[in-house]
């Protein structure tokens, strides 16, 4: 259990984080983590799915869940006086969900619609294709939602076996942030999460680090624009150089003053949406640029992106650029941690990544210590085009990106 008291708030957020996500699935289990997340809201021994929905509405709160490549999270956010009721409800879902066969069959159709929704969203789809291209057959490269075949074929016993393997107290973090009394909270967590939950006998399967692959993948689809992803190798979550790389990402495409936004959108009008972001996992990471443009401008946009990556890799960044990026990083960080939900998430991620809490002051100090020399060394290491991966989706011309194939 990790907690942070925020006495100025009137809310509290409770999250249960399981250290298992889509990367822990075997190919025949693709989509199980996400499907289980859905099923925990479909009825328990004590409540039907409709009663769960009515109860959370009656609390005036928010209850939801999400699955990532490495974790599965269930959370509830309520007014502080509703904390015990929220903990009891979340505990009931987590420990006593029924996985009724009828509900499983119904939920299969819901998840299949979710998969189709991604297929109809080119920004989501190109990023999913890009992950598969860059990481190849590694589990991190698979879709979190799974494949239609595995979803249609899953059985109740498959899901329960998966839970028995991965939903272990030693792999679970209960994270709570907001307004509460610590001594009372400790008693409540013990009551609702600390008893009757035995460790599993099955070991958590080992994770193997991914290899990042370059190359070009083009997929034709009838759209108005071509959607592009360009990827480079990044750093693992918790890497000592992560703050320098975040600063470089901010300069490249992480803000409206970034080089890509200014060069591609503001100066040339070649894209409405263009940005870059970092993805960090326990044993690997990526730097990704996304852009959408007219079919005839694909090569021009890719050339401009590659030019900026190459320049940063050779020259690093200007001191004034770095200071702007650091100021922007600190502002975004402080604003992002103003709610009990965001603090709850940070607490859990810190525990899963580092095994300890990193304070906001520590993070701001790390950002302040980033200097031009460190950024230059990091840019030379990571901003290289020799392993560049390019994914394109849309009405591509036959000779698109010929120079990069």
Image: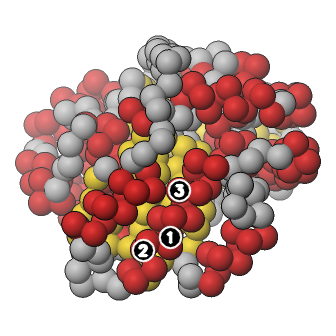
CA–CA distance in space, label 2 to label 3: 12 Å
Rendered image quadrant of residue 254: bottom left
CA–CA distance in space, label 1 to label 3: 8 Å
Q: Is residue 302 visible?
A: no
Taking depth in this image into account, of 92 and 107 the one nearest to the observer is 92
Q: Is residue 4 visible?
A: yes
SS class, disc 2: helix
Of labels 2 and 3, earlier in sequence is 2
Image disc number at residue 286:
none
Taking depth in this image into account, of 383 and 298 the one nearest to the observer is 383
Measuring from the top left, give residue 86's x and y in whole percent.
50, 70
Q: Which residue is mark 1?
A: 86
Position above or below: 375 against 84: above
Quadrant showing the C terminus: top right
Label 2 close to label 1 by CB (< 8 Å): yes
Q: Which residue is mark 3?
A: 91
SS class, disc 3: helix
Q: Is residue 120 left or right of residue 380?
A: right
Q: Residues within 10 Å of mark 1 (few under 14, many from 20)?
A: many
CA–CA distance in space, label 2 to label 1: 5 Å
């Amino acid at each position: 259990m990790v907690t942070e008291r925020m006495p100025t708030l009137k809310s509290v957020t409770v999250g249960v984080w399981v250290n298992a996500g889509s990367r822990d699935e075997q190919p025949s289990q693709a989509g199980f983590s996400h499907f289980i997340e859905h099923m925990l809201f479909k009825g328990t021994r004590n409540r039907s799915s409709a009663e769960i929905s009515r109860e959370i509405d009656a609390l005036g709160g928010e209850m939801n869940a999400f699955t990532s490549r490495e974790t599965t999270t269930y959370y509830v956010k309520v007014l502080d006086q509703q904390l015990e009721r929220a903990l009891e409800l979340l505990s009931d879902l987590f420990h006593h969900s029924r996985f009724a066969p009828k509900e499983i069959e119904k939920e299969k159709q819901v998840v299949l619609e979710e998969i189709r929704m991604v297929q109809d969203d080119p920004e989501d789809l190109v990023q999913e294709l890009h992950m598969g291209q860059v990481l190849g057959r590694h589990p991190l490269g698979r879709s979190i939602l799974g494949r239609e075949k595995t979803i249609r074929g899953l059985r109740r016993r498959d899901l329960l076996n998966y839970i028995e393997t991965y939903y272990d107290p030693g792999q679970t973090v209960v994270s709570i942030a907001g307004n509460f009394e610590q001594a009372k909270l400790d008693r409540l967590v013990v009551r609702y999460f600390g008893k009757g939950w035995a460790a599993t006998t099955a070991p958590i399967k080992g994770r193997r680090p991914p290899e990042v692959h370059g190359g070009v993948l083009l997929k034709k689809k009838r759209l108005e624009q071509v959607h592009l992803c360009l990827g480079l190798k990044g750093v693992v979550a918790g890497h000592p150089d992560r703050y320098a790389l975040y600063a470089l990402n901010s300069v490249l495409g992480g803000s409206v003053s970034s080089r890509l936004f200014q060069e591609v959108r503001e100066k040339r009008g070649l894209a409405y949406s263009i940005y870059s972001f970092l993805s960090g996992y326990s044993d690997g990471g990526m730097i990704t640029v996304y852009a959408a443009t007219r079919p005839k401008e694909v090569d021009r946009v890719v050339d401009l992106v590659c030019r900026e990556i190459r320049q940063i890799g050779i020259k690093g960044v200007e001191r004034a650029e770095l200071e702007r990026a650091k100021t922007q990083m600190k502002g975004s960080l402080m604003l992002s941690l103003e709610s009990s939900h965001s603090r709850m998430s940070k607490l859990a991620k810190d525990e899963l990544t580092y095994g300890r809490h990193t304070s906001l002051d520590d993070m701001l100090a790390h950002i302040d210590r980033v200097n031009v020399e460190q950024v230059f060394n990091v840019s030379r290491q990571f901003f290289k085009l020799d392993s560049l991966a390019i994914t394109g989706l849309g009405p591509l011309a036959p000779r698109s990106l010929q120079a990069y194939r």
